Amino acid sequence: MNSSASLRRDLPPSPDLIAWRLAPRQRWILAEPTAATDRLIAQMPDLHPIVPRILAGLGLDSVIAARNHLACAWPDDNPFRLAGMAEAVTRLRSALRDGETIAIYGDYDADGVTAVALMRQTLEALGGRVLCYVPHRVREGYGVHEQALMSLADQGARVVVTVDCGIRSGEEIAAAQRRGMDVIITDHHALPEDLPQALAVINPHRPDCRYGFTGLAGVGLAFKLAQGLLRVQSQVGSSSVIDEEALLDLVALGTVADVVPLVGENRTLVAKGLARLRRAPRPGLAALLTAMAVAPEAVTSRDLAYGLGPRLNAAGRMDDADVALTLLGSVDLAAAAVPARELELRNQARRAALERALAQADARMAELDGLPSVIVESSEDLPLGVMGLVAGRLLERHYRPSLAVRLEGDLARGSARSIPEFDIITALDGMSELFIRHGGHARAAGFTLPRAALPELTVRLRGLAGEALAGHDLRASLRIAARLAPADMDWSLAAALQALEPFGEGNPKPLFWLPRARLRQVRPVGDGRHLKMVLDNGYGRDPIEAIAFGRGGEPLAAGDEVDLVGSLEIGEWQGRRRLELKVADLGQRAE
């Protein structure tokens, strides 16, 4: 396949117009070629034609934007374009000069923990006296707590830097100010109606912020503050105590783990962080990679999302997050071995707790007479550490906004996950009088409210969602980059797709539609749970293998024609590399 015409030839009808014998489980949305597609193909002749089409599908309609995306280049990374940055750097440099104790207050998830570790490394390298504080998920819950701030003040802290939290903690910040503490907030979450009256508030969503990118994770904002400090240090003629590059592995890990879009500056930071991790992993991450049986030089964004990230998250989910901080600050592999083993144990416990909670949720879901517009799973037995995971899995299975709520005496503490069609944080903001505290994003939020208010929250959310989602096809959607034939799934395509990495939220691995692929072989594998297929790839060509996880019971046989949607993967078995289609969904036509 080497021309734009080959991408447009014989386009099949829309999936919505096909009569299916075996219907797809998800909506298939094929990205049609546009004027931008043709323009990029014409102006970027050095690229495989599928790449400009994918770039156009990401909204990159100029050659400059497309080239920057491929090069993982962000043209302006000046941290002082962020509102509040100058004030924050000035105050921290004063604290460093005068020997004041600086406290770093972070969240207990992977984004927050990597942000705390990053700020600690930076401030200590600059000679700072540093205290770190991460609240306990069960005993304290998310956010900035007044009692914790007072404890930090008692230990001598005169400056507090929040990372990945603080934007909705106005009363707590005011209490710290009254105690004589200066508070610097770095937080990427949605803004409240009124900003806290802190010394500095760094949040790219501020209406007066002129920074060119709003999608940074909490660790990304912490990195911008570190950048500001290090660049001023360099400009005033002091010797470089630490290079920005040494922090990028933490930025990449926290960014991917927090599932923020891997576009713009995030894409640049993750690409550079992966390069750093492959070349010189810090001892703690090297120890975790060993436990995962992943060689550092081969680590990918997927390993961050599904390997390192969950292990760091397991610290705060199952107990105290300090073990993750200990790991990230380890100076050698021997020191990292103990916290690495502890994280492995906690991750195993997290998996077991999640499976138990999901089994209980599934049993209750089976008793419902139809799906509500918002799923609310509440229980006194639901572990706090897996609430967000339960909400996310319920959303994946049923494609509805989902809440997982733990009932604790007179309180209800919960996590919410939502679909693109329903902005959950806007909905919660509209009933803020119900909550003791709440915050988050359009797609994910957390909250605490009186237990007695949970029924009203449920009724009001379902009413809002029912109106917002009326008329929508409530199935998850697969956005398909192009329609291809099995013969197009070759090594040149695989090489072209590697230029689009790192993949993740906002920059997903491209999916392709293979209409009427003929099955040469088909058999269940993995105790019958999965389906292994071999596709006819044309006369004289090697066949393409395909794997459909969780589809082992499909009534398909050799000789059948089947429509497949999936991603092209490079597998390796016994030293032999091969191409494989990882199937995301499938369907068989009625005719």
Image (cartoon, rainbow, N blue to C red):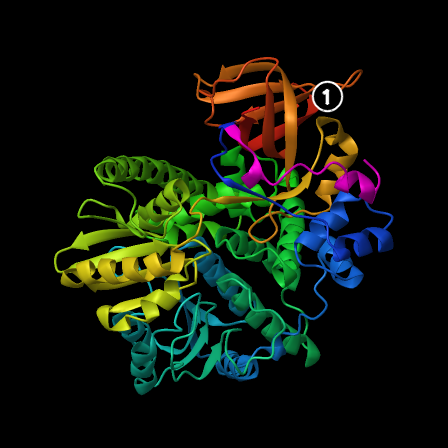
Q: Nearer the viewer, residue 544 or 149?
A: 544
Question: Percent x, y for residue 440?
Answer: 39, 64
Which corner quadrant of the image does residue 455 belong to?
bottom left
Give the quadrant of the N terminus: top right
Q: In this rendering, would 406 be left or right of 573?
A: left
Residue in the image at 86% along x and 53% along y = 42
**Measured along the vertical axis of the image, is residue 57 above or below residue 194?**
above
Which stretch appears magenta?
1-20
Residue in the image at 48% along x and 47% along y = 309
Which corner quadrant of the image does residue 512 belong to?
top right
Task: Classify 10 Å Cα crowding around label 1: few (below 14), some (14-19), many (20 and above).
Answer: many
Question: Percent x, y for residue 307?
Answer: 50, 41
Give the quadrant of the C terminus: top right
Question: Percent x, y for residue 150?
Answer: 28, 75
Residue 122 in the magenta stretch? The answer is no
Q: Nearer the viewer, residue 577 or 328?
A: 577
Question: Percent x, y for residue 124?
Answer: 52, 67
**Measured along the vertical axis of the image, is residue 400 above or below residue 488?**
below
Question: Of the residues shown, which amino acid type is indicated by label 1?
Answer: Asn
Q: Please give the residue where the numbered disc 1 appears in the rendered image.
A: 537
Q: Nearer the viewer, residue 361 or 538?
A: 538
Report whether residue 126 is seen.
no
**Measured along the vertical axis of the image, is residue 186 above or below residue 378?**
below
Q: In this rendering, would 490 be left or right of 563?
A: right
Residue in the image at 33% along x and 57% along y = 466
Considering the numbered disc 1 on the image, is that residue within a helix, a strand or a loop? loop
Residue in the image at 60% along x and 41% along y = 14
